[in-house]
Amino acid sequence: MSLLYLRNRLLNLLLVIWIAATINFITPRLAPGDPINAIFARLESQGQVIANSAQIIDLYRERFGLDLPLWQQYLRYLGSVLTLDLGYSLSYFPATVSELVMRALPWTVGLLLTTTLLSFVLAVLLGALFVWRGTPRSVHLIGWVLVGISAIPYYLLAIVLIFIFAFTLNIFPAGGVTRIGNVASGLSWSSVWDTLYYSTLPALSILLASIGGSALGMRGMMVTVLGEDYLLLAEAKGLPERWIFLRYAVRNAILPQVTGLAISLGHVVSGAILVEVLFSYPGMGYILIDAIRGADYTTVQGITFLLVVSVAVAVFIIDVINPWLDPRILYGKR
């Protein structure tokens, strides 16, 4: 891999982030109305009486720079992006967007990082075993059941799991992240157990919905690998079957799945919006949908910008490490 290629990829990364930041700035402002007016209108609809609301609205618009011309707002926004200052939340002022993100991000990363990695490992093995000789019938049966389940959207699957395991069998809770009365601070066995226990159904809904489709993709790649000369050579050498399966077959078929994994990891920042709403899970998706409902420009912009950056960085990383995963990939001119 040449330095020229690395430089070009870095420039592409910066260009993508700038374009995404620009679209991120423009899109919320295409909606009709003013976010400050929307917040006060929502409070008044709930029966709250706000004296001197017109003057307060003007002060808030000045405080958040919404009274400036659009081009000045854009320049201020780009300056904030460069310094990683995501600004104040309009709905939860004086809390900053960074504070909201830091409270929600560990929950989302813990949930989606675990389910994404588990789904990747299980899908790769299952897809490879689909077409490998000598695979037990039970594995085929489990695999096709998971493929059928993957046709169900994960949020509908979450509703089914809530009905079965929360309301009918009463094994897992229907929502939340800790039991009532557990106020232990810091890391403890009680808090860890509560997190695992309350995250089981959200994780299971995402996991069951994602394995089947990825397994079919891996199955398609394994079909193209079977019969290749290097597999025949490995068999002729008398190498163990397990070694041939993992070292020669799976390794050469896994590259597209690794690319998909990198992109999926980049999307972790956005959260699983509908699942988090259904389970009252305090992750990034939950605060994002709450910010959209409240016309909270700064929070929406902050979360979506982090999502764009994380996906762009994930794609950049996979472009850099691809030559180490598959030596057949060559960069640069010869």
Image (cartoon, rainbow, N blue to C red):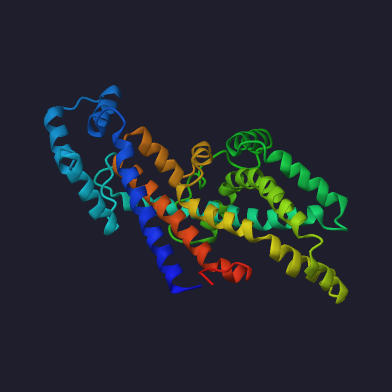
Image vertical order of residue 15 relative to residue 278, above or below: below
The residue under the point 20% across, 40% down is 70
Q: Nearer the viewer, residue 170 or 218?
A: 218
The C terminus - image quarter? bottom right
Image vertical order of residue 203 relative to residue 252, above or below: above
Q: Residue 322 vs residue 69: left or right?
A: right
The residue under the point 64% across, 53% down is 119
Q: Nearer the viewer, residue 37 or 277?
A: 37
User: Residue 162: where, in percent of width, then height?
Assistant: 62, 36
User: Residue 48: where, in percent of width, then height?
Assistant: 24, 25
Give the quadrant of residue 33: top left
Residue 184 seen: no
Q: Residue 12 vs residue 129: left or right?
A: left
Give the quadrant of residue 222: bottom right
User: Residue 275: where, in percent of width, then height?
Assistant: 54, 40
The residue at the far bottom in this view is 237
Q: Residue 199 vs residue 148: left or right?
A: left
Q: Nearer the viewer, residue 33 or 49?
A: 33
The residue under the point 69% across, 46% down is 212
Residue 189 seen: yes
Q: Nearer the viewer, residue 229 or 105?
A: 229
